[in-house]
Amino acid sequence: MKMRFGEKVYKIALAGGMTCPNRDGTLDTRGCIFCSGNGSGDFAAPLSTSVTQQINKGIAGLTARKHTGQKFIAYFQSFTNTYAPVSYLAPLYEEALSHPAVVMLSIATRPDCLPDEVLDLLERCNEKKPVMVELGLQSIHKKTADYIRRGYPTDVYDTAVESLKSKGLEVVTHVIAGLPFETKEDFLRTVYHVGQSGCDGIKLQLLHVLKGTDLARDYEAGIFQTLTKEEYLNWICEAISIMPEHMVIHRLTGDGPGELLLSPEWSRKKRDVLNSLHRKLKEEHIWQGCRRYRSFE
C-alpha cells in the first residue's frame, strides 16, 4: 500500500446491513459454525449509521489511537457483502467510493454470492477506485466444509476467483489454521490450492472459539482442541514457504473480540504472537525468499 499510495493505508470496517445465505434459510439458518452473531464483523461500526458516518467514526477512532495518514480502505466486513440486489449494493459502494479519504474498496463475501450482475457492478466500481474482493474459503476439504457448514463445494471458489480476475478485480482468500480435525498437512494443502488459484493475496487466520457459537459448544464438550502457540507458528512458517512469490500476505494471525474469546488464550497477546512469528521466520530465513519445500501436485 505504501508503494501504491505513497503512505500507510488503514482499513475501516463497515457494516452494510446484509445477511448471509447460511442465515436467512437459503442454505441454513445457523450460520457457519465459528461465526459470531455479528457475522465476522465484530470490529465493524454499528449498522444504525450511514456508510459515511461509519467511515468518519472509524477514521476518528484510528486517529485517537495511533498516528495515521489520510488514506483509508472502506472494508465491508459484516456478513456477506454481495448478498443483495444491485439496486441495494450500488448506493452503498458508491457512497464509500465517494468519500475523499477512501482510496480503495474491500468487500468480504462468499464465492457462491457473485452473480453476473454483481460482478458487473464491481467492475464498474473498480474503474473509479481499486476494488478488492475477499473470499471466505477457510478450507478446501469437504469433510471440514461440511462440519463448519460452509455451504458450497471448493470448485465454486475456483470459479469465483476466475470470474473476479476476468473483471480485473483483486482477490484475497481467507483460510483458517487449526480447524477441528484438520492436520497441518490438511491446512498446507489448502494454502497450496489458494496459491495456485490465481488470487492475489491471502489472509492466514488462527481459529478462534467465540462464546455463543456452535463451535464453542463443541469445544466445551471436548470434541476438539485449539492449536498451541508453537503449533501455530510452525504451521504458518511452513505455509509461507510454499506460497508463490507474487502472493501478498494480508494477515499472519488475528485476534478475536476479548469479551467473546474462549480459546486459545495465548492469542490475546497479538503483538507477542507477531513478534514470535517474525523471529521464527527470520531464523528459518523464510523472508529471504519464498521457497517451495514440497509439491502437492
Image (cartoon, grey):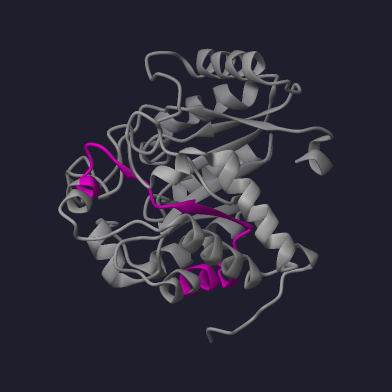
* Residue range corresponding to the magenta coloring: 189-216
The picture places residue 224, in percent across and down from the top left corner, at 25, 60
Could you tell me which residue is drawn at 40 percent across and 58 percent down?
A: 227
Q: Is residue 220 left or right of residue 17?
A: left
Q: Position of residue 276 (x, y in %)?
A: 62, 52
244 left or right of 174 in image: right
| Up-down relation of residue 72 to residue 209 (above or below) | above
Query: At x 43% / y 27%, what residue is drawn?
Result: 15
Q: Is residue 198 visible?
A: no
Figure check: 202 above or below 51: below
Q: Nearer the viewer, residue 191 or 156?
A: 191
Of residue 255 and residue 171, the one placed in the foreground of this image is: 255
The correct choice, above or below, for 5 with respect to 149 in the image is: above
Front in this rendered view, residue 182 or 197: 182
When asked about the image quadrant of residue 47, the answer is top left
Seen at 72% across and 26% down, the residue is 71
Q: Position of residue 255 (x, y in %)?
A: 47, 40
Residue 260, given in percent of the width and then of the height, sits at 32, 33
Q: Is residue 215 magenta?
A: yes
